[in-house]
Image: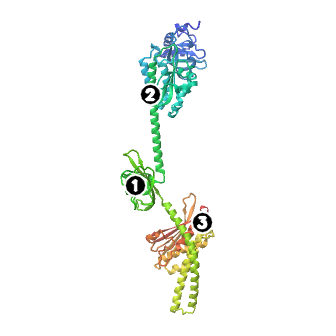
Amino acid sequence: MENKTASFVSDAFTFESAEPLAGAFLRALVTPAFVWESGDGRIVSANRLAVEMFRRFREDSSFLGDYVRNWTKVRSFAFDIMWFEFITPDDRVFPVQVRNSALDEDAGRIVSVVVNAQWAGNRSIDQSIDGLTGLIRTASTTFLSRKDFIDNFETFILRTTVALNLASFNFYPDVSLKSYGLFDVAERLARKENAYKVYSPYLERFDRLKSGALSRLQDVAEEIPDTYLAFPFVNGGETIGWFIIVLYDNREYAQETLQTVLEVFATFFQSLIDKVTMTKALYQSDFENRLNIRIVENVREGIVITNQQLQIAYLNAISGQMFGFKLDDIFGHQLEDLLVSNVSIRKFVDSFPADGEDFVETPSVQYLHRRSGERFPCQIRFSKVSLTEENQYYVFVLTDVTETEESRLKTEQLTQRAILGDFASMMAHEIRNPVNNINTWIQNIKANSEKRGPIYSAATRIENDCQRVSDTISNILAFSRPLKLNPELTDFGVLIDVILERWKRDFAVENIRCYFRKPDDFPKLLIDVKSMDQVITNLVQNAVDAIDHAGGTISLRLSTQPSGIPGRNVAMLSVANTGPGIPDELIDHIFEPFITSKKNGNGWGLAVTKRIITTHRGTIQVKSLSEGVVFEILLPIPDGG
């Protein structure tokens, strides 16, 4: 290395190639700094502190490679921080941390600034107490949390390498570390080390190493140099990974010290594993709690939770809607204050097995009561949840089966109606023929009797009774047989006008005022004219009968209403009268056969009316007011109106 630059050691500021700006920059720094060329490592310029540092190692070269053995490993020049491994006169390694950055990218010049203060200290062969203390402090912050591990593990590896004066130090993780989210960063750093290529072919043999002890890797593979050591890190009997140490072959190490340091590292690592495990468990528990709450609050069943004394501790939103109570209203109350039934709920609970935790269902549908007093059918299932011996709860799942019960009742009604239809056909045949024969003889009797005589009057009464029987049979047959409609586009308003015209004379006789309002642009409806004529006639007849010669008003009104589907309307016909109204006990059953509020009614008119409306895909409802009754019919409008 003759003629390299003798001027370097004599005066660092007299190079002809040094630029004034670079020189000013170097002189301004309070730590060693120097400029060198990335191509051949030639030192271009240095401040006095750098000259002093270089002279500690040798005085006969101006090439960085004669001082630093790893100078070619600079990865980038944008504030790259690394450890330069300086070679001492006795061939030991003296690490110095530097920050490298590009001074002139085109010329390939780099400025390196020393960033740690240990460059000027005298290092002994043994690790100092201060160094170990600082190393343990670094470990404590590195293994503080998963994020700290990911952010600081590389720095921890470098500082341990320097503090213990090792040729290499890293940690190779077992795949089990993946479950803790720590595997990727550890494996990436391990693969970067040159030592990885030496021991990686023998990783499958590492399970032979004694856990918790620093061992030479030659014990598992003779091909591995004796300067390679490993310390298995075990958690709960499961190997998490191995600390890998590579020693300098010309150095003496106190293995007990290394063993102690690694045990400390393992303790910190164990603490991190425990924290990650606990955090995962907390997150999982929190997730499950949130999920359970979301499920409980969104199921269609009501859920009520009580303690062992059946005092209410929780009810979900559906339960609140079902009964009309909030948790604040009912918290701490006895369950029987909420589940008001003819049968004691406590009786079912007392029959529950002491060690049972499966859901048990009440033997039959229970009828409970809402806050408003309304009665509704409910299926009740309950189970015991034992958290501890002292903390045991009952969970009640309540299913409102109103719709199910209504569906069952409708099915029964349809079955009964089918039976009634068959029975009606048979009865019509069996009864109508004798009635017709009776009516024929009545006509003969009347023809041969005086009109004002008692025989003629009696025959007339029998004739009227025969007609009533015939009408009842016709209504029964009409109700039990499927309706056959012949729908056509019809001006509903004109049809109503025609029907009301027929009633004018009756309205005058009964002293009834009749009003009919309809919009000018009311759309045509697809209806069967004959059956719809029967519907309106029935409603008008009922209104006339309700007024019952006392005088009053009948009002009919046509209009369109929103259907609940955007852009679609329905037609509404309301028929109101000022009669006495319908008794409360009949209002819910007024459309059923044989139900009537009239003195001489047979209960078939409104039943047939509803059947006709339903067949037209419409609805009919009744409202009984303080003075009168209103029937409202909704019918679909072709194309939504």
The N terminus is located in which quarter?
A: top right
Is 80 on the left-hand or right-hand side of 325? right
Q: Residue under circle 3?
A: 523
Percent across and percent down for residue 327 are 39, 52
The residue nearer to you, when weighing 143 against 558, is 143
Q: CA distance from mark 3 to mark 2?
A: 83 Å
The local secondary structure at tag 1 comes to helix
Q: Residue under circle 2?
A: 268
The local secondary structure at tag 3 comes to loop
Q: Residue at x 57, y 77 (%)?
A: 428
Percent across and percent down for residue 112 are 53, 18
Q: CA distance from mark 1 to mark 3?
A: 61 Å
| 126 over 151 or under it: above or below | above
The C terminus is located in which quarter?
A: bottom right
Q: What amino acid does circle 1 point to? A: Val
Residue 349: which numbered mark, if any? 1
| 455 over 517 or under it: above or below | below
Indicate which label's residue lies in the foreground, 1 or 3.
1
Residue 227: which numbered mark, if any? none
Q: What amino acid does circle 3 point to? A: Pro
Percent across and percent down for residue 246 are 52, 19
Q: Which mark is first along the chain, 1 or 2?
A: 2
